[in-house]
Amino acid sequence: MQPSRKAPAKATRHRGRNDTLVSSSMLKHAVQAILRRTKLDRTYDIPYLAGYSSDGRTIYIDRHLPRFCNTRARRVGVDRFLILHEAVEKALLDKLGLHYQHAHQIALRAEEAAVRAAGISWREYDQFMQCNIKDVGHEKLRRIPLDLDIKPYRDEHDTQLLKSIQKQLKREFALRHRRQIDLRN
């Protein structure tokens, strides 16, 4: 008996695509799933451009970071890539207990893959990000979210930055407390 020449049935998961292969399309779907599960807040000063809440549900992107990066080819929104990076990093820290530096490297690779999958030059994108990274010595942190996870800053042993964050958080707590008292009166 001759073997069947009929093509094997395609997998039905994820619109019939083989999800075991490296796929820009699958990565885009994964990024969309992460975007649906997180809340973005761009109203604060965030050291190193982006961070996350202690519970990981909110991703914070610095209020001064431009929303778009102009590459030679086109104008590109950057939020989705930073959200991916921060969500991956937070999950690796919390779920697997990795050190920040290790989680950051893996998250950076995921961010790079998503940027490339979107057809954007990593070099241009990364250059844009590097030019916008906030140096705590040059810019004062005026608004910090009360639930900002500070583990990455502790793991980096950035004592000057930690002092600046803690000082501003004390101000934010005091301000919130005063507002609550004012509302009661």
Image: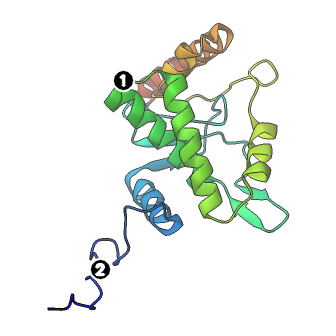
Q: Amino acid at mark 1?
A: Gly
At a point 14% along the width and 91% down the height, the residue shown is: 1
Lateral position of residue 13 relative to residue 76, left or right: left
In the image, residue 139 above or below residue 18: above
Which label number is shown at residue 97?
1
Direction front: furthest residue: 1
- Mark nearest the camera among 2 and 1 is 2
Q: Position of residue 79 (x, y in %)?
A: 60, 53
Residue 34 appears in the rendering: yes
Lateral position of residue 119 relative to residue 58, left or right: right
**CA separation, marks 2 and 1?**
37 Å
Q: Position of residue 8 (x, y in %)?
A: 27, 82
Dot 2 alpha-carbon crowd within 10 angstroms: few under 14, some 14 to 19, many 20 or more: few
* Quarter location, residue 163: top right
At a point 76% along the width and 25% down the height, the residue shown is: 135
Where does the C terminus fall, quadrant-wise?
top left
At a point 50% along the width and 23% down the height, the residue shown is: 100
Q: Position of residue 15 (x, y in %)?
A: 35, 77
Q: Position of residue 4 (x, y in %)?
A: 22, 90
In the image, residue 76 above or below residue 56: below
Lateral position of residue 129 relative to residue 171, left or right: right
Q: How is the image coloured?
A: rainbow
Which label number is shown at residue 83?
none
Lateral position of residue 12 relative to residue 65, left or right: left
At a point 55% along the width and 24% down the height, the residue shown is: 101
* Quarter location, residue 47: top right
In the image, residue 156 above or below residue 145: above
Residue 150 appears in the rendering: no
Q: Amino acid at mark 2?
A: Lys
**Secondary structure state at the residue bearing disc 1:** loop
Q: Which residue is mark 2?
A: 10
